[in-house]
Image: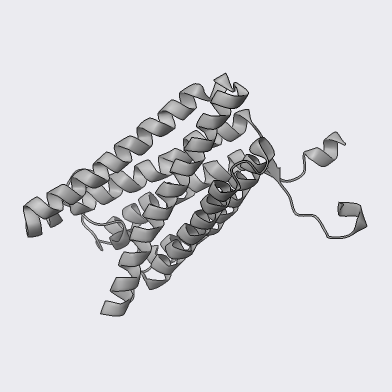
């Protein structure tokens, strides 16, 4: 019985992969792209530098960027589905609408990330629009899913007395508030500065994406304290 229970992928491993793979991919592609002089050497989190997209537009970094980020999309899809199952085991059908909404939004975020990646490096206004909508909707849907997941964890602390999750929950809330505040501040600067905002737009993009993915590190710690494994089983009498 114990051996059977150990089969499958831990949700915490999926969460860590959702954090580490995109960060490793984008930073590796940055160094490769700069080495080939496709982009300038700089600090993308501070300098008037390059966008994240610019690190994966040309060969050979383009292949690494696309493969790494598409893999990230599929891992995140599994993660959000698993997070929904985790909530189902914890609460039953009590919050079924919010749980299903979180899973659907996670699915949409993954699909729009794939849309963005497939359009990356292609010329034309249509591809530019696909990239722009892909990025915006990926960030928006991921953020909303994270808000819903954080709410579930807060309810679990209140109703089930999971005191081991209090600090993680507070850290999640803080990160989400800082991310939202940064996004709003970025929009205000865009309105106020106009075309001059382009000088700092890329740095805001790097910072917000970093915070968006750092959330999954906190989520991995939550799943480590409340473990659940995902596994695939054949349909039939033996699996019932």
Q: Quadrant of residue 50?
A: bottom left
- Residue at the right extreme of this rendering: 237
Counting from the top left corner in percent of width and height, residue 56 is at 35, 63
Q: Quadrant of residue 214?
A: top left
Residue 124 can be seen, yes or no: no
Specify whether 220 is left or right of 88.
left
Residue 225 can be seen, yes or no: yes
Counting from the top left corner in percent of width and height, residue 233 is at 80, 55
Relative to residue 227, is residue 27 depicted above or below? below
Report the number of numbered marks: 0
Of residues 67 and 152, the one drawn nearer to the viewer in this rendering: 152
Of residues 65 and 185, the one drawn nearer to the viewer in this rendering: 185
Specify whether 214 is left or right of 157.
left
Point 69% across, 39% down: residue: 89
Relative to residue 55, is residue 45 depicted above or below? above
Point 59% across, 43% down: residue: 95
Specify whether 191 is left or right of 40.
left
Of residues 95 and 64, the one drawn nearer to the viewer in this rendering: 95
Point 35% across, 71% down: residue: 130
Counting from the top left corner in percent of width and height, residue 3 is at 84, 38
Q: Quadrant of residue 236?
A: bottom right
Relative to residue 107, is residue 23 depicted above or below? above
Way the structure is coloured: one colour
Split into 4 quadrants, where in the image is the N terminus?
A: top right
Point 37% across, 53% down: residue: 140
């Amino acid at each position: 019985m114990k051996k059977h229970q150990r089969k499958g992928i831990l949700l915490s491993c999926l969460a860590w992969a959702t954090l580490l793979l995109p960060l490793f991919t984008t930073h590796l592609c940055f160094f490769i792209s700069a080495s080939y002089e496709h982009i300038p050497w700089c600090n993308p989190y501070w300098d008037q530098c390059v966008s994240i997209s610019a690190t994966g537009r040309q060969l050979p970094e383009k292949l690494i960027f696309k493969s790494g980020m598409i893999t990230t999309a599929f891992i995140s899809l599994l993660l959000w589905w698993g997070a929904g199952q985790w909530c189902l085991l914890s609460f039953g059908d009590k919050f079924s609408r919010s749980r299903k909404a979180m899973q659907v939004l996670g699915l949409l975020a993954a699909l729009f990330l794939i849309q963005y990646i497939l359009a990356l490096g292609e010329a034309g206004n249509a591809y530019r629009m696909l990239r722009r909508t892909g990025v915006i909707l990926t960030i928006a849907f991921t953020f909303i899913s994270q808000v819903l997941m954080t709410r579930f964890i807060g309810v679990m602390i209140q109703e089930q007395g999971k005191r081991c999750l209090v600090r993680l929950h507070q850290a999640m809330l803080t990160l989400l508030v800082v991310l939202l505040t940064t996004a709003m501040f970025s929009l205000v600067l865009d309105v106020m500065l106009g075309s001059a905002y382009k000088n700092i737009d890329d740095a805001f993009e790097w910072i917000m994406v970093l915070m968006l993915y750092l959330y999954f590190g906190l989520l991995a710690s939550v799943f480590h304290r409340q473990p659940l494994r995902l596994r695939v089983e054949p349909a039939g009498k033996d699996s019932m």
